[in-house]
Amino acid sequence: MLSLLKINAVDKSSDYSEVISDSFPSAPAEPLPEFQLEPEDGFVVKNRPVQLRCRAAPATQIYFKCNGEWVNQNDHVTRESLDQITGLVVREVDISVSRTQVEELFGLEDYWCQCVAWSSAGTTKSSRAYVHIAYLRKSFEQEPLGRGVRLEQEVLLQCRPPEGVPPAEVDWLKNEEVIDPAQDSNFLMTIDHDLIIKQARLSDTANYTCVARNQVARRRSSTATLIVYVSGGWSSWTEWLECNAHCGRGWQRRTRSCTNPAPLNGGAFCEGPPTQRITCTTLCSVDGGWTEWAKWSVCGKECTHWTSRECQAPPPRNGGLHCSGSMMESKNCTGGLCTRTLDPGIGVTVYASLVGALLLSVVLVLCVGVLAYRRNCRHLHGDITDSSSALTAAFHPGNYKPPRQDNPHLLRPSAPPDLTATAGTFRDPLFSLRQGANDGHHKIPMTTSPLLDPFPSLKIKMYNSSTLSSLELPAEGRGDAELLGLKHVGGTMGGTVAWDSRLPSEGSQTVLSPVVSCGPSGMLLSRPVVLTLPHCAQLDTPTPDWTLTLKTQTHQGAWEEVLTVGEESLSSPCYLQLEESNCHVVMEQLGTYGLVGQSCPPQPACKRLQLALFAPRAPCLSLDYILRIYCTQDTPHALKEVLELERSLGGVLLEDPKPLLFKDSYHNLRLSIHDIPHSHWRSKLLAKYQEIPFYHIWSGGQRPLHCTFSLERGSLAVSQLTCKICVRQVEGEGQIFQLHTDIQEVTGGRVSLLPPCSPLPSAGTCLPSSQVGPYAFRLPTSIRQKICASLDAPSARGCDWRLLAHSLDFDRYLNYFATKPSPTAVLLDLWEACHQGDADLVSLATALEEMGKSEVMVVMTTDGDC
């Protein structure tokens, strides 16, 4: 019964629920107070009190509590209003906090106030607002110091503002004007309020002041005077003046001035003498004088006799005047009694003699011509390979002939054998040559050099006809795969080859290639050769960023320009063809060469670098562990030099070298180490990073550049090392080495991962088969002769060697090829040098096909030979 009554009661209440809710509405519960405005931190400046304010809704009461104690009700200023939207009561209250109240608080805690609001639902507290007494001391903790700095030097002006509450903000003044780093990027302000001038300019000579300010006061530091000076530099020497003595011993001098640049703002004057003087001797001129007249001759049939004298008393020397007057005199010797007659028989005899002599001369000239023609025909038939055999035999290294058996030198046992008297091929890891039997008068001995140790007296000879040959010499030794390619077109050349990178750069120039010496220096060649230089200039940008210059070294050791790419003229002795990583120089004089460059405005140029990370070879028995990072130019010889240096130091390459583009932006290269496991390892580096100065890298004359990171492990049991090394140019590109290694297992590093024919060989590696001696890539002689014969002659339609140069992209300066006896032959030499690595005949075949030269189109295939 009770359960039924409960159910009925529930049903009845549900039936009248809507009626009850409409008839008797209930007031909603009042929510907790919510702050619309909370008190904020404030500073008592001098004796001015701080106003704190808060506002909450709904609020029946609202008061402040400061440092845990309620503020007297009379100190509150309360305002009450009604929110028009919600209809809730809004209360707002203000209080004032004086300097005395804050100073009366003793203890470690700061003075704080908090607002508390009540409603029927409960109370709500605001966040705390802290009140401090503001001040700013008068004395700076550190003031900037003035000094003199050289032009383009980095400058640091330090400033530590006075102690204050709130902490002071710092501005820098330059001649009483505020410095804004956003307007002048040469200025940089650090978080410690120091001022950095990245590169001191002459305009940066000024007075600098550090200004600290907060709500209380503004303080100025003492003024620091910065003077940017320029040290003097000598201009080039003038030419030697003429000898001051016109006859005999004297002096001649040359001068230079301290104007490159001139010293400025107290910069040092140039060291050294402004003049040089050397002795000279001028040969004295001697005017000629006549000897005495000789005795008169016997009276002749023409009734005359004569006498003579010579200008030999003394003879004229050293520019002296010749004798004036006649050398011979004649007169009648009979006093006019004799008449001059000519015997008719004598006249006929004289004329007959003249005719006979003339006929004899004609016969001799014909005989000499016939002999020369026969000799030339025999030479050509012996040297030139038949065109059909050249095509069917693919690309053989050359045409070889057996030695002559009738050579008398071979029959004398006491005489040393002449290696050039035989025609064959000498194969060696260093070089290989082709020789002909009829070229004895073209031999030139090679100078002794480490490259030629196996045969110090070896002589080199090339074909002097249209037959071509190739000489490949390694740079430094038997195991060096870094080669200098010299393509010879006839003639003979001997000499040494040496590599270096100490080419002085001037101003903003940078060295882009190793310095290559091929000699004998100054030797003139009868036909051009092609010298291939690796370079590290980044050339893949849409617009040219480089001004590239080829330089050569004179016999006196000075460097002078040979040509600038794009500015060739008829006086340019070379032609330079650029590729992504090599440049090919067509030249006719041996010597020492190198490539330099500088940025071409407005874009800064980039050069390719390589970064290599090295560590000690295991086992490591010390707590210290050293990591070395090298920065080298991206050329094969540069990295090879670093590898040889590290082998001598007992280091190994941890990772494959990483490339880096280094921009001409005057920013240094910054290296830092991160994520070291500090529980087991400690870095001994005191600074956050290391830097390699921009000029040391950009000049290209200093090597090898590297930074060292010294680490210390906690115990000998620690062997695992994990860290990151970041290398980047400031405001430029960078690379990161992710290092995870076991220092007790580092043995061979990453060197073993290099390919066997890489540009970084160790002892015993094989040389690239595409660039060595008789295996070097070249066209067969018969094909070359057909191409040259077809394209050398000018064509009215322009389908000649000029169109071939355009098709092969060798047409930047055609006048160079136009001055050669066979322009096509020089173009083919240059094309072969550009394709030594791939032996790609497609580009040449395509060019000939587009020119319509079907008569010289042949099937050009070759089998790879390693």
Image: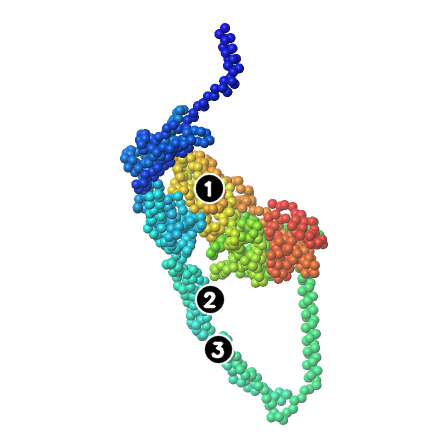
Residue occupying image coordinates x 28% and y 34%? 106
Question: Does residue 596 show up?
Answer: yes
The amino acid pointed to by label 1 is Cys
> Could you tell me which secondary element the residue under label 3 belongs to?
loop
Q: Earlier in the sequence, mark 3 or mark 1?
A: 3
Going by the image, does 69 lie left or right of 353?
left
> Could you tell me which secondary element the residue under label 2 belongs to?
loop
Depth check: give the residue in front, 108 or 695. Answer: 108
Going by the image, does 599 lie left or right of 857?
left
Residue occupying image coordinates x 65% and y 51%? 844
Residue 333 position within the rendered picture, expressed as x and y whole percent measured from the top left: 60, 90
State the separation of the CA atoms marked 3 and 1.
78 Å
Depth check: give the residue in front, 13 or 100. Answer: 13
Q: Residues within 10 Å of mark 2 (few under 14, many from 20)?
A: few
Give the vertical position of 794 relative to 338 (above or below).
Answer: above
Give the vertical position of 244 relative to 535 (above or below).
Answer: below
Q: Which residue is mark 3?
A: 286
The amino acid pointed to by label 3 is Val
The dot on residue 239 is 2
- List the single residue furthest toward the top: 1
Q: Residues within 10 Å of mark 3 (few under 14, many from 20)?
A: some
Going by the image, does 610 lie left or right of 770?
left
Residue 12 position within the rendered picture, expressed as x and y whole percent measured from the top left: 51, 13
The dot on residue 726 is 1
In which quadrant will I find the C terminus?
top right
Residue occupying image coordinates x 55% and y 44%? 758
Residue occupying image coordinates x 38% and y 49%? 172
The reply to whether the C-beta atoms of the residues labelled 3 and 1 are less than 8 Å apart is no
Q: Earlier in the sequence, mark 3 or mark 2?
A: 2
Question: Does residue 679 show up?
Answer: no
Q: Earlier in the sequence, mark 1 or mark 2?
A: 2
